[in-house]
Image (cartoon, helix red, strand yellow):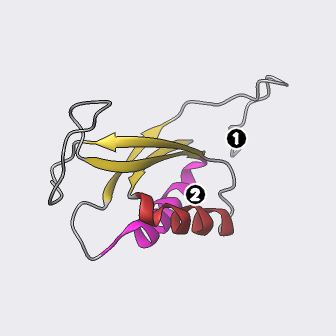
Amino acid sequence: MKEIKAFVKPNRIQRVIEALSDNGFKSMTLSQAEGTGAFKAKGAKPSLDFHVSDSPVVKVELVCQNEEAQMAIEIITENGKTPDPGDGIIYLSNIEDAFQIKTGESLKRYDL
């Protein structure tokens, strides 16, 4: 299984969420965040809350099967990009397994 963490500009997040959902990625977590990436927007100023941030972003987190990861990355990239620099970043990590809290059941599919 794979975990995808994508940091997307707020003005593109609705498109990203709808495209992921339309393609079968129904479960995801969204968090408001602020970043300090390499791109510095004109007029960027430190956040009053964090004192280091210059760029509002939305963090999208989802876990999927290995064979679904590339499609999710392509969907996020296509729907999250703009003509301007600083659109965000996507991280891909391996997940050993995941379990339902209610049942204790594994979410990992075993291909035998």
Magenta region, mostly helix, strand or loop?
A: helix
- The magenta stretch spans which residues? 64-82
Residue identified by numbered label 2: 68
Q: Amino acid at mark 2?
A: Glu
Element assignment for label 2: helix
Q: Vertical placement of 70 versus 62: above or below?
A: below
Relative to residue 30, is residue 71 depicted above or below?
below
Distance Cα–Cα, label 1 vs label 2 = 14 Å
Residue 10's disc is none
Residue 71: percent from left, percent from top: 52, 64
> Does the magenta segment cover residue 100?
no
Residue at the spot of label 1:
110
The residue sitting at 18% across, 58% down in the picture is: 41
x and y percentages locating residue 42 in the rendered image: 14, 60
Q: How many marks?
A: 2
- Determine the residue positioned at 65% across, 68% down: 23
Q: Is residue 46 left or right of residue 21?
A: left
Expressed as whole percent of the image width and height from the top left, the position of residue 46 reads 20, 39
In this rendering, which labeled residue sits more in front, label 1 or label 2?
2
Where residue 94 sits in the image (x, y, percent)?
A: 47, 37
Name the one closer to the observer, 7 or 77: 7
Of the residues shown, which amino acid type is indicated by label 1? Answer: Tyr
Q: Is residue 6 visible?
A: no
State whether residue 84 is above or below residue 73.
below
**Residue at disc 1, secondary structure:** loop
Q: Pick out the residue farthest to the right.
A: 103
Q: Taking 49 as reference, is 66 left or right?
A: right
Quadrant (top left/top right/bottom left/bottom right) for the C terminus: top right
User: Dividing the picture into quarters, in which one does residue 40 lie?
Assistant: bottom left
Q: Is there CB contact under 8 Å for labels 1 and 2?
A: no
